[in-house]
């Protein structure tokens, strides 16, 4: 019993729930981590077929990735269309801007429906990973 309690505490600390972010207009003005993200790591997350799954719906300027999506806007030029602050809100919780979006909230845990028990209270991406994706998308200019 003691081992189970210890395991639950460790898991709770390892995967913290998303903390509330201040939304101003169509943006989250401050970094989730207080630090800028790494564009190289962000590119890897966007291209990942296991983590971000961005290319399942979006296409992007990642030529080596085949079978890119066409259900959502292209990521090419994202940094020209939106500021880092605007990109951050779209990744954290795009439904704040478009309630009918099919894009999942990558950094929200509340108000979700039909979440598997293993994933309840957990975010899809960590705060650092969100910042990495923001940093990468901000580099994509026309």
Image: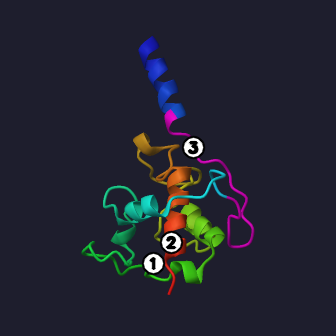
Question: Residues in magenta?
Answer: 14-30
Disc 2, SS: helix
Which numbered tag is attached to residue 17? 3
Give the image location of residue 79, x and y in percent.
Answer: 55, 78
Res. 1 in view: no
Q: Residues within 10 Å of mark 3 (few under 14, many from 20)?
A: some
The numbered disc on residue 137 is 2
Q: Earlier in the sequence, mark 2 or mark 3?
A: 3
**Contact (Cβ within 8 Å) of mark 2 with mark 1:** yes
What residue is pinned by disc 1?
75
Which residue appears farthest toward the top when viewing the image?
Answer: 2
First in sequence, mark 1 or 3: give its number. Answer: 3
Which residue does the image show at 37% across and 73% down from the upper left?
57
Q: Where residue 19 sits: x, y (%)?
A: 65, 47
What is the distance, in whole Å, between disc 2 and disc 3 at their CAs?
24 Å
Image point (31%, 61%), residue name? 49
**Position above or below: 36 against 86:** above
Q: Residue at x 47, y 68 (%)?
A: 103
- Horizontally, residue 66 falls left or right of residue 46, namely left
């Amino acid at each position: 019993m003691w081992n189970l309690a210890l395991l639950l505490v460790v898991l709770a600390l390892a995967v913290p729930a998303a903390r509330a972010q201040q939304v101003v207009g169509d943006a989250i003005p401050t970094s989730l981590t207080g630090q800028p993200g790494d564009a190289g790591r962000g590119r890897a997350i966007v291209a990942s077929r296991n983590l971000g799954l961005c290319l399942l719906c979006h296409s992007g300027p990642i030529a080596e990735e085949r079978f890119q999506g066409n259900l959502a806007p292209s990521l090419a030029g994202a940094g020209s269309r939106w500021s880092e602050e605007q990109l951050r809100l779209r990744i954290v919780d795009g439904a704040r801007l478009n309630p009918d979006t099919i894009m999942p909230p990558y950094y929200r845990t509340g108000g979700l429906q039909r979440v598997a028990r293993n994933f309840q209270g957990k975010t899809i991406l960590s705060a650092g990973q969100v910042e990495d994706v923001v940093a990468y998308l901000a580099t994509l200019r026309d």
